[in-house]
Image: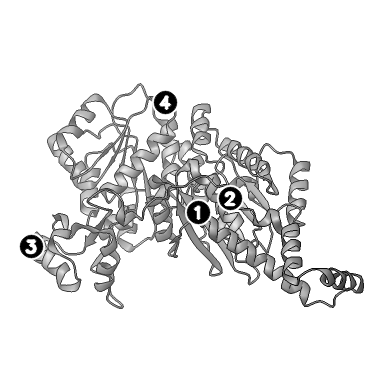
Amino acid sequence: MTDYPMFEDFQLSTDTLHAIRHKGFEQPTPIQALTIPLMLRDEKNIIARAQTGTGKTAAFGLPLLELIDPKNKTVRAIILVPTRELAIQVAGEIDSLKGKKKITVTPIYGGQAIEGQFQRLKKGVHIIVGTPGRVIDHLKRKTLRLEEIDHLILDEADEMLNMGFIEDIEKIMQFTNPQKRILLFSATMPQRIKELAHKYMDDYEFLTVQEEQMTTELTRQIFYEVKFSDRFSALCRIIDVSEVFYGLVFCRTKKDVDNLTKKLAQKGYRAEGLHGDISQAQRERTLDNFKKKRINILVATDVAARGIDVMNLTHVVNYSLPQDAESYVHRIGRTGRAGKEGTAVTFVSGSEHARLMNFRRVINTEIQRAKLPKTKEIIQAKKHAVEEKLQALLSLEPEAKYLQWALELLEDNEPVQVVSALLKQGFHDALTVPKYDEIHEGRPAEERSGKRGKKVRLFVALGRKDQINPKKLVALIRSKSAIKSKMISDIKVMDNFSFLTVPHDKADKIVGHFKSKGQKPLVTLAKK
């Protein structure tokens, strides 16, 4: 393998590689690079320490898709996850990676009609992604059989421990094929998880990736919610409003790099592109042009941008959303260096908003929503830049020949007229009102989704064993926060814990009210 392994190094099928390229993934994340080749050998159980947002779904999903025979219609793998949101997310991600393979992936979780799930299972499913409670329901009803599975995957095992699912997991294991491989993914390794591994995973390999600094204090992080078709116009506005723009613009695919570079050049911007199909000689010329500031915009894919070490970038722009939080950190880490502040700009569509918010939680940083600049603001910014240039020139000792020329002009003309004419001659192009396409920006998440607005699921570490019922749970939440009863919905009380749903704009305040120094919080955001 090369220093930076590629998906092609893992002997994946042509169909899988095509699906990966279609998704825009060029290079595996560290956890994928460790897990994929080991899982493809199908010899050992695996315990992997991996944070949410590091690409672990593809780490186990891609090998699963390679190892499963589509002709065998029985359940070949089950993936257990702590929440229904994660079940939907994981199933969707794996389904998007299967390409043309006739492999069926289905999520099963509580809160959804069990009859519909039964019908899907009856037709034949290869991969199940489920929450423990609903999986047990199906096992008891004998609508799900796991005697022939080859793989059992526990995703976010520590979270399932926190939510009281370990006993359920052990119960599910009793219904599975003893010869199966087990893969356990967990952000942390508490003692109970180690005991589970010791009990059920005799021969396993432990995988972990070095945790990196997940953000930079000198980088201001903002995002704009716009339709994909409006991103080019939005990028032009960002460049034009900036007094100085010297930045990297990241695209998902090589084709996107070529298209964006061409459009920027046609608009008169000094931009060049980098991707894997560009020759080494051209790469060196482009990098030299960028470092010497002959061009101020470099458009690149993630892989092509590796090794670029420029200290004074003002901007990094995520023209396309990166595949995971780690890639996001790698990108934005190129600003805010050498003590200089930088700005990380991300464009997202409405459907991508949740993914970006997940990055924010993983990185534990602030990514602020911003409004795109209007034409007036851009012109004002340009005028300010012109005035600064003039002030800098006025601070210098005037040259005699220009001083004499100025005196001659002022003999026959008013000073204001002379200055006005010179400004028009020298800065007309810079101050011409740009023609921008009209852009409709997305509304904040809490204002979106029709009448109901954006909702958030909360986890409460109290259940029936604590004499909690829905009425008491609502009273508890209201006792600590100013929220109306009708705003609390979808309440589910289990033996050891509960779930409830509240408006997005109330969630952080509720969680904050229940924080207690030195103790595990009673109410937290349900993990997705």
Q: Which residue is mark 3?
A: 471
Mark 1 or 3 closer to N-term? 1
Q: CA distance from mark 1 to mark 3?
A: 42 Å
Q: Of the residues shown, which amino acid type is indicated by label 4? A: Lys
Mark 2 or 4 closer to N-term? 4
Mark 1 or 2 closer to N-term? 2
Q: Nearer the viewer, mark 2 or mark 4?
A: 2
Mark identifier at residue 346:
1
Q: CA distance from mark 3 to mark 2?
A: 53 Å
Vertical placement of residue 90 versus 403, above or below:
above
* Element marked by disc 2: helix
Q: Nearer the viewer, residue 150 or 406?
A: 406
Q: Of the residues shown, which amino acid type is indicated by label 1? A: Thr
Pinpoint residue 425: horizontal percent, then vertical percent.
75, 57
Horizontal relation, residue 397 to residue 238: left or right? right
Q: Residue at x 39, y 25 (%)?
A: 69
* Element marked by disc 3: helix
* Element marked by disc 4: loop
Q: Which residue is mark 2?
A: 236
Q: Which residue is mark 4?
A: 101
Q: Nearer the viewer, mark 1 or mark 2?
A: 2
Q: CA distance from mark 1 to mark 2?
A: 14 Å
The local crowd at label 4, few if under 14, some if 14 to 19, many if 20 or more residues have their Cα within 10 Å, is: some
Pinpoint residue 267: horizontal percent, then vertical percent.
65, 44
Mark 1 or 4 closer to N-term? 4
